């Protein structure tokens, strides 16, 4: 009947849907971010049922451990009075709900006609023999080397952009003022 | 064994919840969080197809999705911080003019 992997998957699926549904509904942004953090742990669990151990570890380390911590930092930096909604009536909720439900219905309509393509060479048996990390490394550094390098450049651009954007403005105006004042003083 | 349609339905549901959150919320940070939900739905779909096809393309693409999502979150949140410094609000309803 229903085997243990299916029960485990049903728990993960129910938890993911519930946590993300609560995360987009609650008023306090800190609660939303923490619920998404818990949801990412369950996503890592689903990756484990799909034989993707390296991706599960990367999901926890990068997504739950770095990206969501950044979100939490910004939420605390912004530091609004969390329970001060200006207007209670949110006119976009019925329209947003209708669009989301329409999208879900459209995707559900398209799923039964899904056919898997031709299988590749990394079957489950081969993957379990070699290990997911090594297999992903082989694929990443031979077939997908160019996207890997481009991803490195994207991360570099993100780092430089983040530093430039989040810099305080006072330092820029101070150096501009001091560099303009000295020649004027010398002329007088 | 778990049929692949279960994973596809879960991914579709997560995408719809992300779309609902993005269209409904007025806090910019929570809108970015809904974008992360949508990205995770796509990643789940890719990893599921990769598992059932016996190929690693889906997992490699998910790897890139996680990296690009990190870069996008960093820059997006830096913009939010700048915006908050100038306008002292993070509600999209009050950030509706390009001046200032």
Image (spheres, coloured by chain):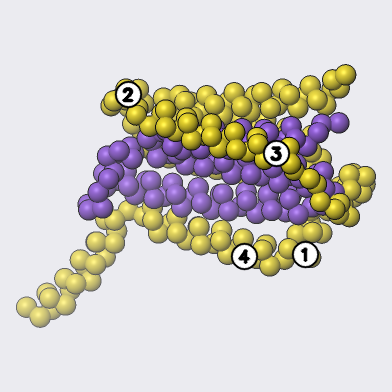
Chain colours: A yellow, B purple
- Calculate the distance from the C-alpha at mark 1 to the C-alpha at mark 3: 30 Å
Question: Does residue A120 appear in the picture of this structure?
Answer: yes
Picture disc at residue A150: 4
Q: Earlier in the sequence, mark 3 or mark 2?
A: 2
Q: Is residue A86 left or right of residue B2?
A: left
Q: Is residue B78 left or right of residue A151?
A: left
Residue at left 63%, top 28%? Answer: A16
Residue at left 24%, top 61%? Answer: A174
Residue at left 47%, top 61%? Answer: A160
Q: Are marks 1 and 2 on the same chain?
A: yes
Q: Earlier in the sequence, mark 1 or mark 2?
A: 2
Residue A39 higher or lower than B53, as above or below: above
Can you identify the residue that label 2 sits on?
A89
Classify the position of the N terminus of chain A by image quarter.
top right
- Calculate the distance from the C-alpha at mark 2 to the C-alpha at mark 4: 45 Å
Q: Is residue A181 left or right of residue A126?
A: left
- Calculate the distance from the C-alpha at mark 3 to the C-alpha at mark 4: 33 Å
Can you identify the residue that label 3 sits on?
A111
Picture disc at residue A143: 1
Q: Earlier in the sequence, mark 1 or mark 3?
A: 3
Looking at this view, name the residue that lies furthest to the top. A1
Q: In front here: B56 or A57? A: B56
């Amino acid at each position: 009947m229903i085997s243990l992997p299916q029960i485990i998957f049903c728990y993960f699926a129910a938890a993911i849907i519930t946590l993300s549904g609560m995360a987009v509904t609650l008023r306090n942004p800190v609660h939303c971010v923490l619920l998404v953090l818990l949801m990412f742990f369950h996503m890592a669990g689903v990756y484990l049922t799909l034989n993707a151990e390296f991706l599960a570890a990367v999901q926890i380390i990068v997504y739950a451990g770095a990206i969501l911590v950044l979100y939490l930092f910004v939420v605390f930096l912004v530091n609004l009075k969390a329970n001060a909604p200006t207007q209670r009536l949110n006119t976009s909720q019925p329209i947003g709900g209708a669009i989301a439900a329409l999208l879900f219905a459209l995707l559900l309509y398209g799923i039964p006609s899904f056919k898997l393509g031709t299988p590749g060479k990394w079957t489950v048996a081969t993957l379990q023999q070699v290990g997911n990390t090594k297999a992903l490394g082989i694929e990443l550094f031979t077939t997908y080397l160019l996207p890997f390098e481009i991803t490195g450049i994207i991360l570099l651009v993100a780092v430089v952009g983040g530093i430039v954007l989040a810099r305080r403005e006072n330092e820029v105006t101070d150096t501009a003022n001091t560099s303009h004042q000295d020649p004027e003083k010398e002329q007088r | 064994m778990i049929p692949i349609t279960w994973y596809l339905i879960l991914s579709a549901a997560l995408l719809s919840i992300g779309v609902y959150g993005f269209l409904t919320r007025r806090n910019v940070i929570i809108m970015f969080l809904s974008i992360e939900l949508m990205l995770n739905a796509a990643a789940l779909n890719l990893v599921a197809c990769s598992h059932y096809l016996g190929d690693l393309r889906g997992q490699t693409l998910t790897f890139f999705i996680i990296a690009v999502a990190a870069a996008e979150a960093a820059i997006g949140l830096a913009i939010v911080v700048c915006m908050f410094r100038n306008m002292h609000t993070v509600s999209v309803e009050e950030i509706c003019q390009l001046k200032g």
